[in-house]
Amino acid sequence: MSDLPALPPTVRSRRIAAVNGLTMHVLEAGFDAGPRPVVLLLHGFPELAYSWRKVLPALADAGFHAIAPDQRGYGRTTGWDGAYDGDLGSYHFFNLVRDQLALLSALGIQQVHAVVGHDFGSPVAAWCAVTRPDVFKSVALMSAPFGGVPSWPTESTAMPALSALHDQLAALTPPRLHYQRFYATREADADMRSGPQGLHAFLRAYYHVKSADWPGNRIDPLAAMTAAELAKLPEYYVMQADRGMAATVAPHMPSPQQVAACAWLPEAELAVYAGEFGRTGFQGGLQWYRSAGHPAHQAQLLLYAGRRIDVPACFIAGASDWGVYQRPGDFEAMQATACADLRGCHLVPGAGHWVQQEQPEALNRLLIEFLGSV
């Protein structure tokens, strides 16, 4: 597509109809060299299939057919319910997995060599592996560790839900608000889409403050899932309660000189994100957070209590990514119990949360090494 900068001629854009009620937009590379093992790439928030633009060609060069969809609620995929009061159930993890199964079916693909998920795409990839290991033969999780399938709660083992910590965070001085709680509010979409600095500037500040470029991302893992510990996170995770996300990131807007020096996200590429979210808004992506935090939706996951990821797995994140540690214990549980065959756990120097954009060469090397091992 001519309006998607930095896409080499080996990457194509197309739409696939009849995908679990969607017409899904995908980017592909390695599609024109005969049958190849498939790698499915799942983006997070607030991102797009376009976020894999530096990964798709490398996977194709390594002998794979790489496919990156705009997931439900995002970009040029259509057919999803974008209303705050709309069908929240369509954003449940099980239906997001169903989206990927339907996409593969529409493409005539019976199984994939690996499913790769970044940010909120990471738990979707994890649930793909948990629920359909016959289809998703390995999994690479990025930035968001998978702490495991929920277990039946007991007094001795239950980790306090984020909702149970809300009152404790609000009682701090100054009062604090977890970002996922904010993302569940009716106001969140308009706050980010129509903030006073404008959408392009909001996204510039948001991507900057979660990257290795921001000096505040010096990681010191939290000791416990308590309000006092969570308050140590940067404010883009645990906000001041009287601010929205636009106001939270605004003070960290990079200077014009820093913007000009940002080789991993130049202005023309940032304009793609601003254009897409300006057109669709953020509510589709925000519905993922609302569904994940809904008690009835959480209870459905207990169908798989006692299961773990049995297919080969790896984890890759930026060394300056607080997302690895935002839920204390998940990073350790992923390594100890959640994955039966974890073949690597890598923290990439010089990268924050957007590892596949900030350090694509290192990410591609690690990912291709993992794919070769399975």
Image (cartoon, grey):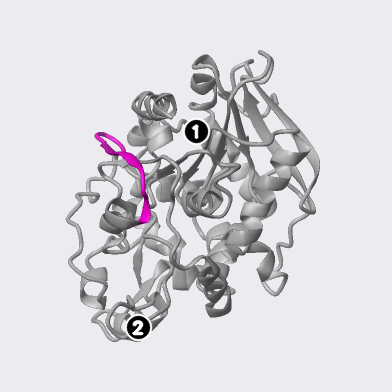
Viewed as shown, does residue 215 lie left or right of 7? left
Please report the bounds of the magenta region as a residue range. Answer: 338-351
**Is residue 350 highlighted in magenta?**
yes
Q: Amino acid at mark 2?
A: Thr
Q: Give whichever of 72, 107 is nearer the camera.
A: 107
Q: Amino acid at mark 1?
A: Glu
Viewed as shown, does residue 77 lie left or right of 37? right
Q: Secondary structure at mark 2?
A: loop
- Label disc, if present, on residue 83 of the rendered structure: none
Residue at the location (70% across, 29% down)? 13
Q: Quadrant of the N terminus?
A: top right
x, y percent for residue 348: 28, 35
Q: Quadrant of the C terminus?
A: top left
- Mark 1, residue position: 267
| As drawn, 29 above or below 326 | above
- Label disc, if present, on residue 154 of the rendered structure: 2
Q: Secondary structure at mark 1?
A: helix
x, y percent for residue 273: 57, 42
Return the disc, 1 or 2, that comes first in the chain's sequence. 2
Say few, some or many: other residues with alpha carbon within 10 Å of mark 2 (under 14 / 14 to 19 / 20 or more).
few
**Callouts 1 and 2 close, C-beta under 8 Å:** no
Say few, some or many: other residues with alpha carbon within 10 Å of mark 1 (under 14 / 14 to 19 / 20 or more).
some
Looking at the image, which residue sits at the far right?
18
x, y percent for residue 187: 56, 72
